[in-house]
Image (tube, rainbow, N blue to C red):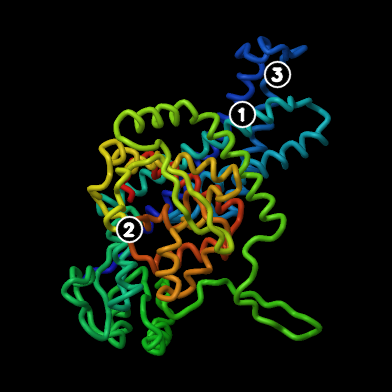
Amino acid sequence: MPGGRAHDRWDSLIPLLTVLSDALLIFCSFLLSYWIRFNSGIFERLGFAPTEIPPVGGYLLGSAVMVLVWLFLFRARKMYRARRSVNLADELIGVARVSTLGMLIVMSAAFFYRDFSYSRIVFGLIWLTSVPLVFLGRLAVAKLERTLHRGGRALRTAVLVGSEGPAEEVFSRLQRHPSYGFDIRGYFAEAPAAGASLLARIPRLGTIQDAGAFLRRYPTDVVFLGTRVADHAAVFDLIGECEGLDIEFMMVPDVLEILTSRTRLVEFEGVPFLTIKSNPLTFWGRFAKRSMDIGLSAGLLLILSPLMLLIALAVRLTSRGPVFYRQERVGLDGTSFQMLKFRSMRVTAEEQTGPVWAERGDPRRTALGVLLRKSSMDELPQLINVLRGDMSLVGPRPERPFFVGRFKDKVPKYLDRHRVKTGITGWAQVNGLRGDTSLEQRIRYDLYYIENWSVTFDVKILLMTVRAALRFREVH
């Protein structure tokens, strides 16, 4: 079985292309901003005509400094590595952060540089134009890298250790995303994978004890460890056997046997305490989250009001019953509220069955309801819930009291979801865990969100939600 190091030249080329793209587009941003301010005529029509047009040479010198600052900041944030496997939301947020910090540094330097007077409007335009331009350039480089991977080029060789649970989940994700660039040669486990398992599609290379000899004989780039606690001793031995080998080990924790919560060490009067569960949002965190909820929900309601009126009219004309569907849901601290949706099912949907879990192709849906649920437009009235404070834009999806009572004793840590406001979208949903999917896995993602909350995390989830909505995927 051949080994793999043929990807090395691509792993050098991709970062180089990213650096060149960033440098070129930052420079273009500078020139574009200069043109908009002084040559486009836009600001003259707005009443901000310059007294004189400064020479472009001074701005070209400034652009050279700015390019160096930007590239240094990108490098410091480790945004020039090959195979970063960063989703588009993370990339956009990273570019925005670097551009903002870089702009502040350049403006500070320009304040002390008295030989040339730079326009503050130009600096503002540079910030506005550099973020989309640099992001689009990085998007093009990432597209090239993923195209290479999908074509079977520049792949990293990898093996799996484990045959169920985490190992199968890793293999499933890598199979769905060949753009990650891994060639999975096989797996090591104490017993063969079951016939229905996805792992049965690739060779079993031996037991965990056999992995060390294999890795020494066949050059391998990555070992994915997805084992149970009972196998950890063998895994530690394997890592020891591979000392001196250029192999990256990546371990997937067994979520059934560890806490999702982050742990941190605090000290009182010299006595250390290990915090294993803390308040997810501080006062300022709640303030920032609520401010974002009010601002975005009010703005979206204003922008989307014509669309919502059309949907309301279509619901009224195509089926008997009210426009809105009001349903009791459980939110923060276990309190109930009335969640709003555009009605997508017949009025009599649950008269015979009572509360039931929605399924793919649910026959209770109206013809318009199928379209609304596919596009998630039935969720738009929940912006009103957000504005009222019942919900947040981002958080665990709210559930009905019937199902909360049913799951709270069956699913570990299920009620921990109610430590924050429920949301229109969430970390589980943007990772494909919606509708008729594993409830335990959804809870795991919800709890990860709660324990790792930040404003940036919320922005990332919102960007991923927009991307998913544009793909027009089926939801339940």
Q: Is residue 103 visible in the rendered structure shown here?
A: yes
Horizontal arrangement in the rendering, residue 468 relative to residue 387 (left or right) = left
Horizontal arrangement in the rendering, residue 193 relative to residue 383 (left or right) = left
For numbered disc 2, what is the local secondary structure? loop
How packed mark 1 is, by other alpha carbons closer than 10 Å (few <14, some 14-19, many 20 or more), is many
Residue sitting at x 41%, y 46%: 142
x, y percent for residue 395:
52, 55
Residue 352: image quadrant is bottom left
Residues tagged 1 and 3 counted as in contact (Cβ below 8 A) = no
Residues tagged 2 and 3 counted as in contact (Cβ below 8 A) = no
377 versus 51 height, above or below: below
Lower position in the chain sequence, tag 1 or tag 3: 1
For numbered disc 1, what is the local secondary structure? helix
How packed mark 2 is, by other alpha carbons closer than 10 Å (few <14, some 14-19, many 20 or more), is few
Residue sitting at x 65%, y 80%: 274
x, y percent for residue 84:
45, 56
Mark 3 highlights which residue? 55
Mark 1 highlights which residue? 30
For numbered disc 3, what is the local secondary structure? loop
In front of the other: 398 or 164: 398
Residue sitting at x 44%, y 65%: 404
The type of residue carrying mark 1 is Phe
Residue sitting at x 29%, y 76%: 164
The type of residue carrying mark 3 is Pro
Lower position in the chain sequence, tag 2 or tag 3: 3
Mark 2 highlights which residue? 354
